[in-house]
Amino acid sequence: MSEYQVGDGAGGEPSLTEQAQEKVQQTARQASNKTAEYVRTQTEARASQAGEELRAVADALRRSGHALHADGKEMSGSAVDTVTQRMEQLSRYLGGTSGDQMLRDLESFGRGRPWGMIGLGLGVGIAASRFLKASSRTRYEATRATPSALPPSYGAVPYAEPVTQVGAAASRAD
């Protein structure tokens, strides 16, 4: 007997179209679950890594704060201490929170402060554009150094050696 049966939907037998639709929906659910799991594990791994980096920066700031206190600059030292404490809190949060919990926290922040989310998105966008602009010079110089590395669809004119007049002048001198 075939896995798919032809029916008209009457009498309780699903039609071939309904069976195919159910199979597509099941495959889409599986793909969605796998994607969600991948995103969750990547988020947790990246957050843990960011937490470790923040912890290292916080340690460096703490040393700077101690140096400021030792130099008698109490106000500056206190400001650095406050920033250090916040960074340590964030690093503990990133290192010890699951990806699902981070997503729930981000959603609740967005619901409570929609303008804050807009500002956060704007800030991330500006930071990403600055990063791309800063790295574009390197990419540009790399393509200028090796013009043959450009893909043919780039519309670039093929590189040709400049014509020199040395050969023509030499032949006239004879």
Image (cartoon, helix red, strand yellow):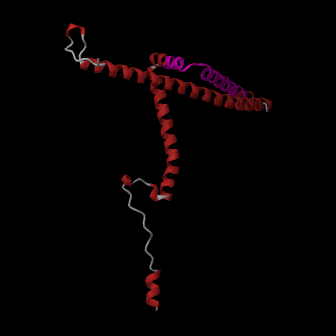
Examine the image and state in which quarter residue 75 appears.
top right
Q: Point out the image quarter for the N terminus.
A: top left
The residue under the point 38% across, 55% down is: 152
The residue under the point 44% across, 71% down is: 162
Magenta residues, start to end: 77-106
Rendered location of residue 76, percent (x, y)? 70, 30
Q: Going by the image, does 58 lie left or right of 16?
A: right
Callout count: 0
Residue 80 vs residue 145, the one in the foreground: 145
Residue 18 vs residue 158, the one in the foreground: 18
Rendered location of residue 55, percent (x, y)? 67, 28
Rendered location of residue 69, percent (x, y)? 77, 29
From this viewpoint, which residue is outermost toward the right? 70
The residue under the point 43% across, 89% down is: 172
From this viewpoint, which residue is outermost toward the bottom? 174
Q: Is residue 92 a member of the stretch shown in magenta?
A: yes
Majority SS type along the magenta span: helix
The residue under the point 38% across, 57% down is: 156
Q: Going by the image, does 34 lie left or right of 73?
A: left
Q: Is residue 138 a member of the stretch shown in magenta?
A: no
Residue 67 vs residue 138, the one in the foreground: 138
Rendered location of residue 20, percent (x, y)? 29, 21
From this viewpoint, which residue is outermost toward the top? 11
Placement of 160 over or under 58, stated as above or below: below
